[in-house]
Image (cartoon, rainbow, N blue to C red):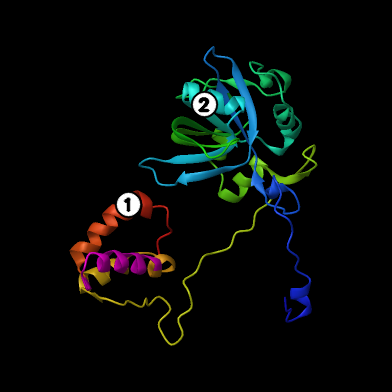
């Protein structure tokens, strides 16, 4: 291998080992506690960080979680079809680690913590009172991807937050939540966490356009005047993305012009009012 400069020579490949995400690599992940019940109604609680939004729209909002297929959490979700994702604060890291211990099946880990189970709104497994936000889920599907690993996709049936989080802006909400971030481990015994105690806010702006008006967007197809007028009502910082998506769809339909009627119909399908309400108007 030929290195072109000293900086490139300082980069080293590392072996890809089991638990590669927490070996040498530092890969920050959100900390959650999933509560479930077994067929007898006994509560189980376990910490999970392989958690991502799977469908972010509101027609069928979903999350996906990775876990061991032999875990009590996975068995309970498959057998009862329900679970709650709880978001603890960094003040409860000792309790988070308590739920990490490998208790025998049928033990309620919450009884060994300072956590308090409370009734959830739409599912049978309890939520955790000391957590400020919760996602209640119904099992949509589960996939066993190899001998040990599984994925769970859950339909979100309720998102519940503490009242005091509703009256503050996002920056203050982040500070109040004080969420812990899992940063990896040493030898699968010593676990590292950081805390989200502050957040930087950076404004998203339109891409620079040399020699053009700041908010002007380049189009590749012909657009009817009515379609262009409707396009200009969209916030400038996402306008280029909307043009590219629209023209891609129209071209695949075998057309070479974006009519006003087609554009408005696409907006209703892909960006209805509740979606556009999430964007700041200009």
Q: Is residue 90 above or below residue 230?
A: above
Q: Is residue 188 above or below residue 218?
A: above
Question: Where residue 45 sits: x, y (%)?
Answer: 63, 25
Q: Nearer the viewer, mark 1 or mark 2?
A: 2
Q: Residue at x 52, y 27 (%)?
A: 83
Crowding at label 1, few (<14), some or many (≥20) Cα neighbours within 10 Å?
few
Crowding at label 2, few (<14), some or many (≥20) Cα neighbours within 10 Å?
many
Q: Magenta span has 253?
A: yes
Mark 1 — residue? 273
Q: Where is residue 202, by image quadrant? A: bottom right
Residue 194 in view in this figure: no
Q: Residue at x 41, y 84 (%)?
A: 212
Chief secondary structure of the magenta span? Answer: helix
245 with respect to 132 (left or right):
left
181 with respect to 61 (left or right):
right
Q: Residue at x 46, y 85 (%)?
A: 210
Q: Secondary structure at mark 1?
A: helix
Quarter holding the N terminus is bottom right
Q: Is residue 159 above or below residue 274?
A: above
Mark 2 — residue? 77
The residues bearing labels 1 and 2 have C-alpha atoms spaced at a distance of: 35 Å
Question: Where residue 80 sits: x, y (%)?
Answer: 48, 21
Region rendered in magenta: 241-257
Question: What is the tally of numbered marks visible in this picture?
Answer: 2
The foreground one among 83 and 11 is 11
Q: Residue at x 53, y 40 (%)?
A: 145
Q: Magenta span has 14?
A: no
264 with respect to 86 (left or right):
left
35 with respect to 19 (left or right):
left
């Amino acid at each position: 291998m030929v290195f072109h400069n000293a900086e490139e020579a300082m980069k080293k490949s590392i072996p890809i080992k089991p638990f590669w995400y927490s070996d040498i690599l530092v890969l920050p992940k959100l900390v959650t506690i999933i509560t479930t019940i077994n067929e007898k109604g006994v509560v189980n609680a376990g910490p999970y960080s392989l958690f991502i939004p799977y469908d972010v729209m509101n027609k069928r909002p979903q999350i996906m979680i990775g876990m061991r297929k032999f875990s009590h959490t996975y068995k309970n979700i498959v057998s009862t079809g329900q679970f709650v994702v709880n978001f603890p604060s960094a003040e409860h890291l000792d309790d988070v680690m308590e739920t990490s211990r490998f208790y025998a099946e049928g033990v309620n880990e919450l009884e060994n913590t300072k956590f308090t189970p409370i009734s959830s709104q739409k599912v049978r497994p309890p939520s955790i009172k000391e957590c400020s936000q919760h996602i209640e889920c119904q099992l949509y599907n589960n996939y066993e991807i190899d001998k040990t690993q599984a994925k769970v996709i859950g339909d979100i049936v309720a998102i519940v937050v503490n009242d005091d989080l509703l009256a503050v802006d996002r920056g203050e909400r982040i500070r109040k939540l004080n969420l812990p971030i899992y940063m990896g481990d040493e030898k699968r015994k010593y676990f590292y966490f950081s805390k989200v105690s502050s957040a930087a806010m950076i404004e998203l702006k339109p891409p620079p356009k040399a020699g053009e008006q700041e908010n002007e967007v380049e189009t590749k197809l012909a657009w009817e005047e009515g379609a262009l007028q409707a396009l200009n009502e969209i916030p400038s910082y996402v306008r280029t993305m909307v043009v590219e998506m629209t023209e891609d769809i129209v071209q695949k339909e075998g057309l070479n012009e974006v009519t006003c009627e087609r554009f408005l119909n696409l907006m209703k399908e892909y960006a209805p009012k509740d979606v556009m309400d999430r964007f700041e108007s200009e």
